[in-house]
Image (cartoon, rainbow, N blue to C red):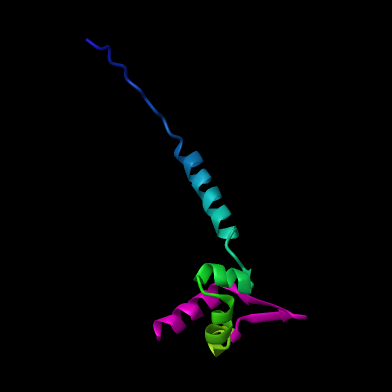
């Protein structure tokens, strides 16, 4: 007969909560704030040219555009929502 053993695990709930809170905080802070055209193309799986022609000229997207010199960025979360709205109208 095979001998049986008993395993006991004790979990400190406060430490577990602290760890989960810390990991959630990391994920929240790693979210994008601004995106450029290359990141938009990567995230949406659309070409840069298609974005320029079909998406970026829409007023719902232009509102979230930030320019400095010749560089353009977009505020990430609102522009993603605007793109979803535009695409859902097709």
Residue drawn at the location 50% of the way across and 80% of the way down: 82
Nearer-the-camera pick, 19 or 46? 46
Span of residues in magenta: 62-90
Q: Position of residue 64 (x, y in %)?
A: 60, 81
Based on the displayed image, in which of its 4 quarters is residue 77 positioned? bottom right
**Is residue 85 within the magenta segment?**
yes
- Up the image or down, 63 lies above or below 1; here it is below
Q: Position of residue 9 (x, y in %)?
A: 39, 28
Residue 86 relative to residue 36: left or right: left
- Up the image or down, 27 lies above or below 8; here it is below
Q: Position of residue 80 (x, y in %)?
A: 51, 74
Q: Position of residue 20 (x, y in %)?
A: 49, 47
Based on the displayed image, in which of its 4 quarters is residue 53 positioned? bottom right
Quadrant of the snapshot with the N terminus: top left
Nearer-the-camera pick, 44 or 79? 44
Q: Name the residue at the top extreme.
A: 1
Nearer-the-camera pick, 48 or 58? 48
**Is residue 75 within the magenta segment?**
yes
Based on the displayed image, in which of its 4 quarters is residue 38 positioned? bottom right
Residue 67 relative to residue 82: left or right: right
- Number of marks present in the image shown: 0
């Amino acid at each position: 007969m095979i001998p049986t053993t008993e395993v006991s695990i004790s979990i400190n709930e406060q430490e577990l909560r602290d760890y989960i809170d810390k990991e959630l905080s990391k994920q929240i802070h790693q979210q994008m704030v601004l995106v450029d055209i290359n990141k938009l193309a990567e995230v949406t799986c659309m070409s840069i040219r298609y974005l320029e022609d079909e998406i970026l000229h829409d007023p719902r997207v232009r509102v979230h555009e930030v320019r400095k010199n010749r560089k353009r960025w977009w505020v990430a979360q609102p522009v993603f929502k605007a793109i979803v709205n535009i695409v859902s109208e097709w």
